Amino acid sequence: MSPLSYRIGKKGQLNLPGITYASKKAAEELLLKDAETHHCFFRQSGFHNHLGHHILAAYDLGTPPGHLQKIYEDEARIQRPRILEEKDKNIVVDKDNWVQYLGNQSAYGAFVKFFSNEIDASGVNGTFENYVFGEDASKAGVDMLARVISGAVHPLIQIGYGAEFGNDTLIATGLAQAAVHGTPSKFHINKSPPSQSITLLELLAEIYASDVLKPVPYDPQPFISTRVKSVLDNGGAEEIERLCAQFHISDTITDAEIAQKTEELIWTAVLLTFGTGRKGRKPRIDFFLMHILTSSLFMRPLCALLKKQEHKAALIRTYIPVMVLFILARGRPRIDPELLMSYTAVPRPPSTSGDHPKPAETAVGNPADNADYNPWPALIEGVRYHSDSHVLKSMRTLIFATQHFGDTPPGGVIGAFRTQGGKQEETHVGMGKVDGTIFVRSAGVMMETLGWSGYGQKETDWDRSALGWDAAWESGD
């Protein structure tokens, strides 16, 4: 690798107490070791290496250096080497031949070297302009921007961590990861302004109402790729393009518009991830919808990294139909804002429920009293011990959301209402009651569902039933 910076050059979006010089140094060393040692897929079938994500998510949550080392050792056991076979050492990717190696897992190490050298020579923005947004990078069959958002959005997440923490090595490995993904689904969104642009929650309502996008009969067995194909066939791709064009993103998008649209994305991602269960049933949290949640956190640092407004617009414009595709591939699950608002806003870890010592006579308030209790410190501490990096990553998005949008009043969510026939109505039943407490409610239901493992609760897994189909709920809880 070229001597790129492996340092953490920027504070994370949370930057919680607990971060020290020692934890920063440990995180930097572990990130470099992962980049130099491991492939981006820990299985040939395309399961992604999340080690760097886990390290940085934990670091940003205030995890001490010894704990970071334990996280590394736990996940490093399952990784594959960066150079898969001896013959792969002979692969050399350069400016003239890089396109011919696209989609080739064996070329990952060579792509890391290539993009490291390009960033060293041209900087991050120059590399993006050439290899993500450039003319050659945008040709049919190359489609690098679409590749960045392919693979359950993992290349974007990897690059997003690099953008957030100012780590060029993560950006190089993220671009290399994008390059070795297969040919992605690509959408062509009309950039002409519609007669009236709609909000993201309005777009979601249009997705639910579309007869063209009605789910095919339920089959519990297919891979996600099979479900995606069934969505795109028979006019599905064209319908997604038509509807997404109504969520207008101009090439001259302003920073204020970026802030609004990325806020909309986070609210919608939270509602989709934690508000698509069924009343009276145990909560289910879909594995693929969760990736919308975790990736939504990186849209702001990625847009801040890019210099040209049209590139920022292209990034968001390319992301939205992929988000819609995920929703449809899960059976078009409907958000239930009332269900999400029914979850407790004062979640507690199991071992401390009602088990607080009696406060001193001089204490003002009582931690055993929900009216006095702040659940976030326990949630932040509790999530660090979960073995699944996705849980920490999801919690990071929820913490960011509560920091920035937690004071939103009922009815204050962008797109909660729309005007129909001269009258204002909710875009989704119950949206008028949704407020900024949905983030702590979501954090609590995630820990209760997936396990407070640091407090002795058994860890469970994300839901993969494709919960949008009614038939997916027939097997019970």
Image (cartoon, grey):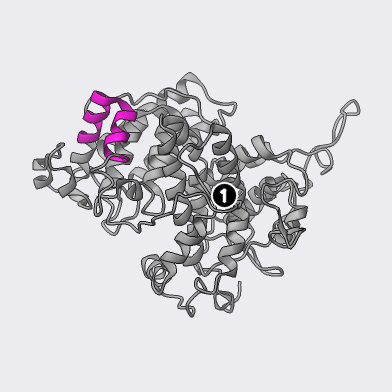
Q: Residue at x 54, y 53 (%)?
A: 194
Percent coordinates x, y for residue 96 in the rendering:
12, 39
Can residue 174 be spotted in the picture?
A: yes
89 left or right of 452 in image: left
Mark 1 closeness class: few <14, some 14–19, many ≥20 residues within 10 Å: some
47 left or right of 442 in image: left
Q: Residue at x 60, y 40 (%)?
A: 260
Percent coordinates x, y for residue 185 in the rendering:
35, 59
Q: Quadrant of residue 111?
A: top left
Q: Does the magenta run of residues contain 128? A: yes
> Is residue 147 placed above or below 237 in the rendered structure?
above
Report the residue marked by disc 1: 453
Percent coordinates x, y for residue 395 in the rendering:
57, 44
User: Which residue is nearer to you in this view: 78 or 218?
Assistant: 218
> Is residue 126 placed above or below 242 in the rendered structure?
above
Q: Which residues are magenta?
A: 113-133
Q: Quadrant of the N terminus?
A: top left
180 left or right of 54 in image: left
Q: Residue at x 46, y 31 (%)?
A: 164
